[in-house]
Amino acid sequence: VKSIQIENGQVHCVVETANDVQTLVFDRVLSAIGVQPNTTGLGLERLGVELNPQGFVAIDEYCKTNVAGLYAIGDVAGA
């Protein structure tokens, strides 16, 4: 997202990709910056699940954890 402007009650977002630049128009835009690990109180330590230095569950490219048969996605796995 290169820029956002509100015009006549609508949100105009200028978006740049590798191939082009376009303006998209929306009623509302939600922007979330940063992801926090949501791993507290899940009992991961009892299972022996490894966390990365940022506190997220450590996963491989297939979302597998170090525990056989256990996968992690979303708030516990990071961006």
Image: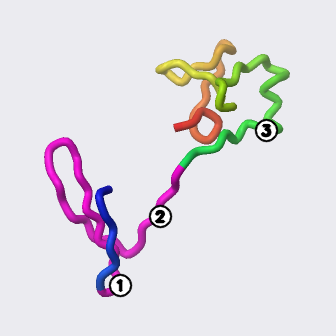
Cα–Cα gap, marks 3 and 2: 26 Å
**On the image, numbered disc 1 is attached to which residue?**
9
In this picture, which residue range is highlighted in magenta? 8-33
**On the image, numbered disc 3 is attached to which residue?**
40
Q: Which image quadrant is residue 5 in?
A: bottom left
From the viewer's side, name the closer residue of 32 and 74: 32
Residue in the picture at 70% in, 19% down: 50
Residue 63 magenta: no
Q: Amino acid at mark 2?
A: Leu
In this picture, residue 44 sits left or right of residue 75:
right
Give x and y (percent) for residue 22. 18, 59
The numbered disc on residue 30 is 2
Give x and y (percent) for residue 31. 47, 60
Q: Check contact, mark 1 vs mark 3: CB within 8 A.
A: no
Residue in the picture at 82% in, 30% down: 43
Residue in the picture at 65% in, 31% down: 54
Q: Is the residue marked by circle 2 packed among few (<14), some (14-19), or many (20+) residues within 10 Å?
A: few
Give x and y (percent) for residue 21. 17, 55
**Which color scheme did the rendering employ for the protein?**
rainbow
Q: Which of the two discs, 2 and 1, labels the residue nearer the N terminus?
A: 1
In this picture, residue 34 sits left or right of residue 48:
left
| Helix, strand or loop for disc 2 | loop
Residue in the picture at 55% in, 47% down: 34
Give x and y (percent) for residue 45. 82, 23
From the viewer's side, name the closer residue of 23 and 65: 23
Residue 10 magenta: yes
Q: Is the residue marked by circle 1 packed among few (<14), some (14-19), or many (20+) residues within 10 Å?
A: few
Q: Which of the two discs, 1 and 3, labels the residue nearer the N terminus?
A: 1
Q: Amino acid at mark 3?
A: Thr
Q: Amino acid at mark 1?
A: Gly
Q: Which image quadrant is residue 44 in?
A: top right
